[in-house]
Image (cartoon, rainbow, N blue to C red):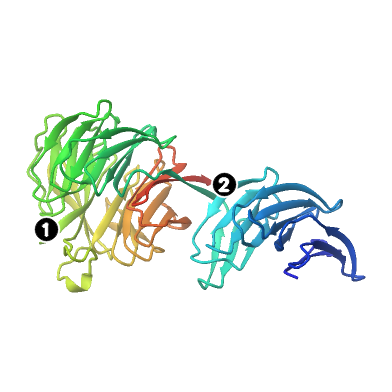
Amino acid sequence: MCAVVIAGDGTWLATASGTDQTVRFWDPATATQIGILKGPTGRVTALAIAPDDAWLATINDDSEGTIRIWDRETSTLTRTFAAGRRVNSALAIAPDGAWLATADYGDGTIRIWDPAAGMQTATITGHTAGLAGMAIAPDGTWLATRSTYDGTVRIWDTAVDVQAANLTSQAGRVSALGIAPDGMWLASGDVYDTKVRILDTATGEETATLTGHTGRVSALAIAPDGKWLAVGDFDGKVRICDKATGALTRTFTESTGHVSALAIGPDGKWLAAGDGLDGRVRIWNSDTGKQACNPIEPIIPIARVSALASAPDGRWLAIGYGAIYDSEDDVYDSEDDVYDYRLVQIWDPGTRSRINTLSGKTDNVSALAIAPDGRRLAVGGGQDGRVEIWDPATSTLISTLTGHTRQVTALTVTPDGTLLATAAYDRTLRIWDMVSGQAVTMMRTDTVPAACAWMPDGAGLIAGSEHGIHFFEFHPR
């Protein structure tokens, strides 16, 4: 016997056998069998009874991991759908019966299903090994899962649906990513070649390739009107490309090292480029191609610009600094460095004057993101994976987000400013409530996500890694 479940009213119970492939109903008062379900192929691995006791669900250890829905009164099979996995170790039905969850014994993936439609509606990842148990809270607002292999019990918010899909696997190792203001297309740069690819966000089809770059792509930014984009190279050049024609219209060549970060003003009239070697930030007039002012000099010796972000109104520019890595070791060790890289500077790009300096506990800043109202600035960095939320006007630390176990690689805020997405070397993408600082959900990836960006409607998150570009559909319930 592999499962025993008691009906909600306590008048009967169901048992599943791994030997004779049956589910039997029993009267606990008389210890007599009162019904039987026959027909499954493969042993029953999980069993659950609906809250109203009118139906029950079973999972079988067959080639498809089949989920079957049965009518309790007639003992008839009413619906069958394939889970797509051979071994599902746990099954639970929501208190209202509107959805059910299955757990994968192999990789620990949790899948949410609509039993009426027989469709999968969401995927939850986070466990690193198979699951041994699962339970849904009485009010249905959270789900608990247990894995004996990764040694954790995790609590999940069921008010959020995340569905993952590969947008394309042909984009190479993505080093930079940007989404057009209308969400119709995106641009991606590859760390291994000099091309920028334009992809249709609906189909994943590559619609254009921008060439003419002599260095590998290191940074990318799309103009607010979507008509042009700026591409930074590892050879220190910034190139302006026309989106409609793909033509190279202008090249800026003042950097001494590689272009490590780009930011475009909200009116598209200026462009800031960070240098990954000398730590300077150069601001260009995007129409004339001339530098608008002298470069902004770093106040830290041997620092590199690691991140840039422009305020929504263009009145200030945030600059994040990091250490220059040893070419033989791409991991920064703060204990070996005498300088303090826990700095983000706020500058006025018009007057080239420093407004504020933020100095927190996030060393070696790796990513920045600004809320649409400009009142919150997210700062990522450091080997502990922390993300700090700051008030840039007052230099006040508002909150610290902890959950990542390795350095953050990218940050992005939804257009309405409510959610923050973070990507990190721990191969996870996490979504946070920007105001409360609470974690909303987490997605595990099979490789390090190097870049991420929200779709304009906030319902989808695009992430780029060495395996291509992936789309996560996000639906808070």
Task: Name the side, left or right, on which 77 lies relative to 206.
Answer: right
Task: Name the side, left or right, on which 343 lies relative to 143.
Answer: left
Vertical comparison of 420 with 22: above or below: above
The residue located at (32%, 58%) in the rendering is 408
Measure how far apart labels 1 and 2 are at the Cα level: 47 Å
SS state under label 1: loop
Label 1: few (<14), some (14–19) or many (≥20) C-alpha neighbours in 10 Å: few
Q: Position of residue 50 (x, y in %)?
A: 75, 55
Task: Name the side, left or right, on which 218 lies relative to 131.
Answer: left
Quadrant where the N terminus lies? bottom right
Q: Is residue 390 visible?
A: no
Disc 1 or 2, which lies upstream in sequence?
A: 1
Q: Quadrant of residue 406?
A: bottom left
Q: Which residue is mark 2?
A: 477
Which residue of the protein is positioned furthest toward the top in this rendering?
A: 245
In-front residue for pair 59/160: 59
In-front residue for pair 259/339: 259
Q: Position of residue 464 (x, y in %)?
A: 35, 48
Q: Which disc number belongs to residue 179?
A: none
Vertical comparison of 339 with 297: above or below: below
Q: Which disc number belongs to residue 299?
A: 1
In-front residue for pair 436/220: 220
Mark 1 residue type: Ile
Mark 2 residue type: Arg
Q: Quadrant of residue 111?
A: bottom right
Label 2: few (<14), some (14–19) or many (≥20) C-alpha neighbours in 10 Å: few
Number of numbered callouts drawn: 2
The residue located at (54%, 65%) in the rendering is 154
SS state under label 2: loop
Task: Name the side, left or right, on which 177 lies relative to 327.
Answer: right
Q: Is residue 104 visible?
A: yes
Marks 1, 2: nearer the viewer = 2
